[in-house]
Amino acid sequence: MIIQICVGSSCHLKGSPEIVELLTKAVEEHKLQDEVTLTGSFCIGKCNRIGVTVQVDDEIHVGITRENFKEFFEDKVLAALNSGRE
């Protein structure tokens, strides 16, 4: 799985450094280093008024914040990885 975090100027101002940190910690806590590649991307092209844009494989998610990060990670990362294992 490849997760790209927008680090362009708009997302940077809306918290992309914090989302990068949260993703890094979550990947480590769930021991997913061999299954998940984290990368940065300059402007994914789906700017939103609130939060950061994150692309998980081919699916783009907008509005990722510290407040909704846990739900995003569980629903879009862990669930996708678990469904791929079945």
Image (cartoon, rainbow, N blue to C red):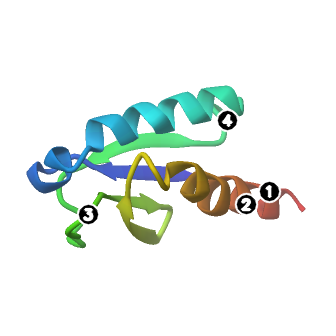
Would you place residue 67 above or below residue 22 in this image? below
Disc number for residue 79: 2
> Disc 4 on helix, strand or loop?
loop
Q: Quadrant of the C terminus?
A: bottom right
Tell which residue pokes out farthest to the front in this image.
67
Instruction: Please identify the quarter of the rendering in which residue 21 is found.
Output: top left
Instruction: Please identify the quarter of the rendering in which residue 54 is found.
Output: bottom left
Q: Are the residues at dot 3 and dot 1 in contact (C-beta closer than 8 Å)?
A: no
Residue wearing tag 3: 50
Residue sitting at x 34%, y 49%: 5
| Disc 4 packing (10 Å; few <14; some 14–19; many ≥20) | some
> Disc 2 on helix, strand or loop?
helix
| Disc 1 packing (10 Å; few <14; some 14–19; many ≥20) | few
Q: Earlier in the sequence, mark 2 or mark 4?
A: 4
Disc number for residue 54: none
How far apart, in angstroms, are the residues tagged by discs 1 and 4?
Answer: 11 Å
How far apart, in angstroms, are the residues tagged by discs 3 and 4?
Answer: 28 Å
Give the residue type at disc 2.
Ala
Q: Earlier in the sequence, mark 1 or mark 4?
A: 4
Q: x%, y% of residue 77?
A: 62, 55
